[in-house]
Image (cartoon, grey):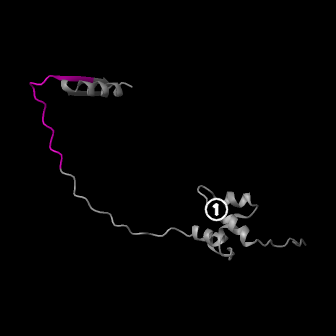
């Protein structure tokens, strides 16, 4: 018969606080922290839930305060007036000179019309399309 003579380890409140502080860091996983401190991750989870957590005031209590789950906070959002409806686009004036671009790629065809007065905008748009 095999008898386990290994005694349980006892950890100080300062050590537990250090482990819990490492768990509270952004991006830290409990398993990785436990492995780094040569602890079982289930033990660290128990400490985070409060069982066997450090009782000393100061750093330990701050760490426990950081590990409490977030709570719902109700906020009132000011309502704004709904945006005014956009008037329908007017068809271009046939007397105005227009730039017409037509693209075909396979079965897809696109036709774009720009006023000559916005030729610079048309050139900028065309450069982006052709990239």
Q: Is residue 98 magenta?
A: yes
Graded by Cα atoms within 10 Å as few (under 14), some (14 to 19) or many (20 or more), the crowding at tag 1 reads many
The magenta stretch spans which residues?
Answer: 85-102
Q: Residue 68's x, y, as percent?
A: 56, 70
Query: Relative to 103, is 131 on the left or the right?
Result: right
Q: Position of residue 86 (x, y in %)?
A: 18, 46
Q: Residue at x 72, y 72 (%)?
A: 13
In the picture, which quadrant includes the C terminus? top left
Q: Nearer the viewer, residue 121 or 93?
A: 121
**Residue 42 can be seen, yes or no:** no
Name the residue that disc number 1 marks: 23
Q: In which quadrant of the rendered image does the N terminus lie? A: bottom right
Closer to the camera in the image, 25 or 109: 25
Task: Say above or below: 56 vs 112.
Answer: below
Q: Position of residue 98 (x, y in %)?
A: 17, 23
Taking the spot 23% from the left edge, 28% from the top edge, the residue there is 112
Dominant secondary structure of the residues highlighted in magenta in the image: loop
């Amino acid at each position: 018969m095999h008898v386990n003579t290994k005694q349980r380890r006892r950890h100080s409140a300062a050590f537990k606080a250090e482990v819990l502080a490492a768990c509270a860091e952004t991006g830290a996983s409990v398993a990785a922290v436990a492995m780094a401190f040569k602890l079982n991750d289930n033990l660290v989870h128990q400490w985070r839930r409060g069982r066997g957590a450090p009782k000393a005031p100061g750093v330990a209590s701050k760490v426990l305060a950081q590990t409490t789950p977030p709570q719902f906070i109700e906020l009132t959002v000011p309502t704004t007036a709904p945006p005014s409806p956009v008037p329908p686009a007017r068809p271009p004036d046939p007397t105005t000179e227009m730039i017409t671009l037509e693209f075909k790629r396979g079965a897809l065809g696109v036709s774009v019309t720009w006023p000559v007065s916005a030729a610079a905008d048309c050139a900028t748009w065309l450069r982006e399309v052709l990239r």
